[in-house]
Image (cartoon, helix red, strand yellow):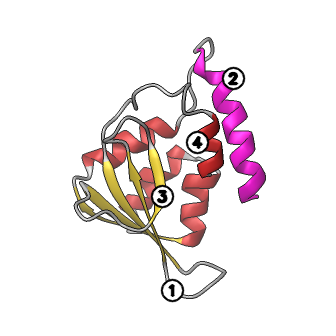
Amino acid sequence: MREIRADYANDEGEPDIQLAANVTVTNPPFGEGSILGHIDSSGPTLMIEEGHLDQPEFSLEVRYELAYQLFVQRDPAAVMPAIFAGQIKLTGDSSKVLMLAGQMAPPADGDPRRDQLREIVARIDAITA
């Protein structure tokens, strides 16, 4: 992931939203314990990294299967039903979760970022499949 981010570092613009979130993925089918990560767009670029932030705006905890659906399959429509069903535990500013879900949708046809995003997604899919 870091290599992919570095390859596009000069092409990135400011993130569309500003947020800092911790993500805890429970019950992974590999290793022991939970996977701790964070999403941070408060700097000049979007960062998705391991470990938790000291002061996130919100945190979410989700089982591995749902995390895969949300983050790897990128299904923004799954966010709200999962929240209402109690499958995502939220703490902090929940309005930011809705903003994050909105960002998961692909750019509209004609948006110059669309082709580059498809290329990036294909590279990510190749290492997460």
What residue does disc 1 label? 33
Q: The disc labelled 3 sits on which kind of residue?
A: Glu
Q: Nearer the viewer, residue 70 or 58?
A: 58
Residue 53 falls in image quadrant: bottom left
Q: The disc labelled 2 sits on which kind of residue?
A: Asp
Q: Is 106 drawn above or below residue 97 in the view shown?
A: above
Identify the residue at image location x=55%, y=54%: 70
| Residue 64 seen | yes
How far across and how far down the image is residue 26, in percent? 49, 77
CA gap between label 3 and label 1 equals: 17 Å
Identify the residue at image location x=66%, y=26%: 116
CA gap between label 2 and label 1 equals: 37 Å
Say few, some or many: other residues with alpha carbon within 10 Å of mark 2 (under 14 / 14 to 19 / 20 or more).
few
What residue does disc 3 label? 49
Say few, some or many: other residues with alpha carbon within 10 Å of mark 4 (under 14 / 14 to 19 / 20 or more).
some
- As helix, strand or loop, the secondary structure at mark 1 comes to loop
Q: Is 77 drawn above or below residue 68 in the view shown?
A: above
- As helix, strand or loop, the secondary structure at mark 4 comes to helix
Q: Is 64 drawn above or below residue 106 in the view shown?
A: below
How far across and how far down the image is residue 20, in percent? 31, 51
